[in-house]
Every structure is written in C-alpha cells, then in structure tokens.
Image (cartoon, rainbow, N blue to C red):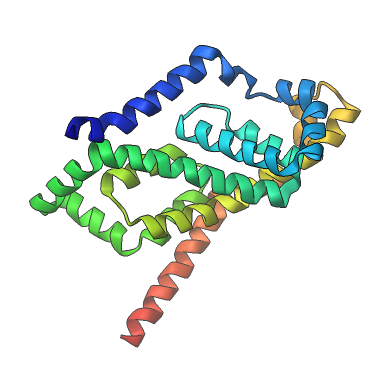
Amino acid sequence: MNLIRRFGPLLVLLAVIALIFGMGWNRYLSLETLREHGAALRGFAHDHYVLCLLLTMAIFAILTASVVPGVFFVTITAGYLFGPWVGGVSTSIAATVGALIVYGVARSALGRALRDRADRDGGLMARVCAAIDKDTFWYVLASRLAVVVPFHMINVAAGVMGVRLTPYTVATVIGLLPAHTIYCWIGARLNALLAEDPNPDVQALFARFWAPMLGVFVLAVVLPFALKTVQAAWLARKAGRS
C-alpha cells in the first residue's frame, strides 16, 4: 500500500504521457494546427466562451504536467482565442496547476525520502534546502521570470526539496504571467498575420513580433538581475529593522 501511494502518481503520469504520444496528440501542437483549424476554434470559443476557456486550461494543465514538448503553441492558441489578458492569466494558472502536479509526483516518489535524509545528514543539501525554505518565494519567482530556466526542472527540484507549497504556488503564477501575456499577445495578433500570409515563414513572424520577442529577452536576462537587486535591498532593510 505504501508503494502504491508513493509511486502511484508517477505511474499515472507516465501512463498519460504514453497515451498522448501513443495517440499522436502531440502532433497537433504546431502552428499548422492553428492555421488549419483557427477559424473553427474561434467560432467555438465565440459560441461557448466559458467552456472553451475551461477546456483550454485543462488541456494546458495536462500537457504541462505530462512534459510534452510544444505546450508553447497552446499558449499562442489561448491568445488567439481569448486575447492577451484572459489568455495570459488563464494559461499562467493552468501552467501552475501542471507544475503542482509534477511537484506532487516528485514529492511523493522521491521528495520525502531525499529531504529526510538531507535533514538527517545536515550537509550541503540540508543547507540548500534551508536557504530555499527561507526565501522560497524569491527563488521560485526569479526562476520563473528567467524563461531560460527549464520549467520542469524547477518543479521536480521543488518537489524533491519539499519547498513550502504556498509561496511556491504564488511565485509560480506571478512569475509565469509576464511571459505568458507576451506569448498570448503574439497569438492575439496572429489572426491578422495569417489573413495576410497563410504560410508565414520565420522571417515574417520575427518582423511582425520583434517587440514581444524583445520583451521575452528582457524577462530572461534583465529582469532576474533587477529582481535580485530588489531582493537584496529588501533583505538589507529587513535586517536593519531587526
């Protein structure tokens, strides 16, 4: 029974991944799908707005948890259907749900044993866990904002280390929101581009969306450094008060 409780979530997740790839659903995560079925999807979203939004969030959460490549195109589709703000917020929440699933799987399968061992040994791993426990929100927020940091590596590491769930969840939603809003902004503008050019190449996409791409670069490189500066100032002020 303990083994089922411990490894059951991992087996379920692996079964979902096998089902997605076995059915070939991952092949639909492409610009080609949006180009061929975009009009039909927009019509469905117009007629069944809430249902379509909830379905998009559910699909996004499942694909995120399943570590399937190409989830980026679901973000673009959300922007295409719902605009940058609704799409950005909804996909950030859905991605957080997917991240929490991976966190829970890693926590149940490996986290408790590794964290208990680290706490008993009192070595480097224990000190790293203690540091992250102390500033979970800032660590996770900086990692989410830096879009170059592998998304699932953070989820697995957080589960293995057993970081506190509330700051991890809040920091994930906030940290994902800027990039997701930018991607959804691209998706919202994609309809006009596809109307002008049904088969846009990379050069055409870059020419149209260079500004939001620059925004992603700022998120990946500049913003984490700025965040670290703000964090250092905040900690210094906090230390001065104590």
Q: Would residue 123 appear left or right of 6 to someone viewing this image?
A: left
Snapshot quadrant of residue 103: top left
Q: Position of residue 154 (x, y in %)?
A: 39, 44
Q: What residue is shown at x 27% (from left), y 60% (from top)? A: 131
Q: What residue is shown at x 47% (from left), y 58% (from top)? A: 170
Quarter of the picture holding the C terminus: bottom left
**Of 75 and 219, which appears nearest the observer?**
75
Q: Is residue 152 visible?
A: yes
**Residue sitting at the far left:** 121
Above or below, 169 against 5 in this view is below
Snapshot quadrant of residue 155: top left
Q: Would residue 111 appear left or right of 94 to someone viewing this image?
A: left
Q: Is residue 139 visible?
A: no
**Of 198 and 40, which appears nearest the observer?**
40
Snapshot quadrant of residue 38: top right
Q: What residue is shown at x 78% (from left), y 33% (from top)? A: 44
Q: Position of residue 108 (x, y in %)?
A: 27, 39
Quarter of the picture holding the N terminus: top left
Q: What residue is shown at x 45% (from left), y 50% (from top)? A: 143
**Numbered label tally:** 0
Above or below, 150 against 20 in this view is below
**Of 66 and 206, which appears nearest the observer?**
66
Q: Position of residue 133 (x, y in %)?
A: 29, 60
Above or below, 77 against 116 in this view is above
